[in-house]
Image (cartoon, rainbow, N blue to C red):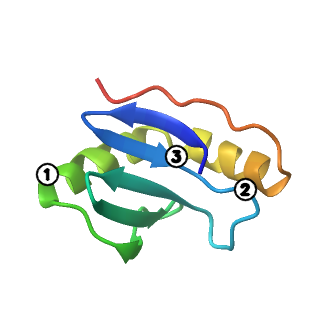
Amino acid sequence: MPEISRFYGIIIAMFHDEHNPPHFHARYGSDRISIRINDLSITNGSLPPRALGIVIEWASLHQEELLHNWELAMDFKPLEPIAPLR
């Protein structure tokens, strides 16, 4: 799974040739979650509340970049790194 960002122990990644709707994956320890890019809703999994809040904050700042990476992933092109939350 290509990693596109990492911050506070959270890894953000996106698969190539993934199913719709556009989404990304986040891992924090043994917890995993999938989040829809357009409305930042959870499609699968869970994270501890604090980690989830951090991921949603980061994603809200980078929705356009996430959608751009989704398009790259669907074309099997290399994904671009996205700045971590600071």
User: Could you classify mark 1 by the number of other residues whose Cα lies within 10 Å: few (under 14), some (14-19), or many (20 or more)?
Assistant: few
Q: Earlier in the sequence, mark 1 or mark 2?
A: 2
Q: Nearer the viewer, residue 41 or 76?
A: 76
Mark linked to residue 50 = 1
Looking at the image, residue 48 sits to the left or right of residue 78; the answer is left
Q: Earlier in the sequence, mark 3 or mark 2?
A: 2
User: Could you classify mark 3 by the number of other residues whose Cα lies within 10 Å: few (under 14), some (14-19), or many (20 or more)?
Assistant: some
Residue holding disc 3: 63
Mark linked to residue 16 = 2
Q: Position of residue 23 (x, y in %)?
A: 55, 62
Q: Secondary structure at mark 1?
A: helix
User: Which label lies toward us, 1 or 2?
Assistant: 2
- Tell me which residue sits at (66%, 32%) in the image: 80
Amino acid of disc 1:
Arg
Mark linked to residue 6 = none
| Mark 3 vs 2: CB contact within 8 A | no
Looking at the image, residue 80 sits to the left or right of residue 36; the answer is right
Amino acid of disc 2:
His
Q: Nearer the viewer, residue 64 or 18?
A: 18
User: Which label lies toward us, 3 or 1?
Assistant: 1
